[in-house]
Image (cartoon, rainbow, N blue to C red):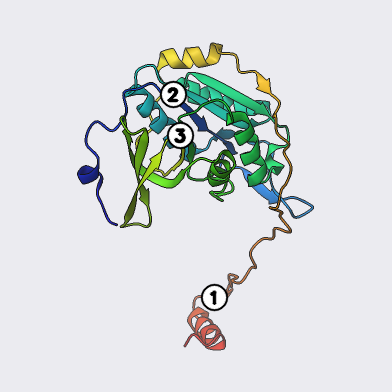
Amino acid sequence: MRITGKETFGPSRLKKDSMKILVCVKQVADSESHFEISQDGKNIVCRAPTSYRINSYDEYAIEEALLAAEGSPGSSVEVISIGPDRVKEALRRALSMGAAEAHHLLVEDADLLTPESRARIIADFAAGRSYDLIFTGVMSEDRGGSAVGPMTAELLGMPLATHVMALSIDEENKSIQVEREIDGTRRHQLRLPMPALLTVQSGINRPRYPSLSNVLRAKAQEIPGLLPGGEARPGDFLTRKLTLPPDTRRGVLLQEDSNSMADKLLEYLHSISIL
């Protein structure tokens, strides 16, 4: 079904009742960092010095959660992240955007976690906390697997919508209507009962700049490190081996003077059957 946001969603897209919302964020290495395959061939590692930042897809998820909370008086937005102590920087970024509370699940070797392990840790944390909505970015920039959100929804028994580009919350029926991106030109409309988990696509909104007051609050707010309650077991998802793509094309340097360069180039092109 092809639909447009203007036809489907009116200006009041958010419910008035208070909601409890959780956003899952991930800290990723900056794309300018130096990446290598580990010696065992099963992981990608970043060589120091490395700078880290919040996953850009998760910023869209945070913004969408804040918009939902702002339309529902009394609602709150919490953020959660898994990793070593440095992930608190990503959590403070979320707090400075307007999130009310941050949860740090302390896992020192989080880069070695499989998607299933991450999902189990998040699901163990969220179970029993009565979240109305859980948001994640559609994928992480470092792995791009788009697996943690759907796995978390499955473990929590929540309905799921992926690649969400627009949403509207039904106040009376406790449901949420979404538009999912199918490809570049088509969208799929879906209605889910709440609580639900949504993975948010880039372009759904424009993430806000942190306000000065929120930046100061984020700096002062304590973020204790919590040990995951669930077992970070590898599950059925195993990485056997990572390799670099084969070097199929190599540049050829022709070292000739200007008088013979054309003849040499023509000879080379004939040799590889281009002409």
Residue 115 picture location, percent across and down? 63, 46
Q: In this view, does 10 lie above or below 163?
A: above
Q: In this view, does 114 lie above or below 228?
A: below
What is the tally of numbered marks visible in this picture?
3
Tag of residue 128: none
Residue 13: image quadrant is top left
Q: Residues within 10 Å of mark 2 (few under 14, many from 20)?
A: many
Q: Which residue lies furthest to the right in this view?
A: 40
Residue 219 picture location, percent across and down? 54, 15
- Label 2's element? helix
Question: What residue is drawn where x is 55% and y is 13%?
Answer: 221
Q: What residue type is labelled 3?
A: Pro
Residue 209 picture location, percent across and down? 39, 26
Q: Residues within 10 Å of mark 1 (few under 14, many from 20)?
A: few
Residue 64 falls left or right of residue 159: left
Tag of residue 195: 3
| One can see residue 29 in this view | no
Q: Residues within 10 Å of mark 3 (few under 14, many from 20)?
A: many
Question: What residue is drawn where x is 24% and y is 49%?
Answer: 4
Measured Cα–Cα span from mark 3 to mark 2: 24 Å
Nearest to the observer: residue 256 or residue 202: 202
Q: State which quarter of the image contains the N terminus.
A: bottom left
Q: Nearer the viewer, mark 2 or mark 1?
A: 2
Q: What residue type is labelled 1?
A: Asp
Residue 216 picture location, percent across and down? 48, 12
Residue 28 falls left or right of residue 41: left
Residue at numbered disc 2? 97
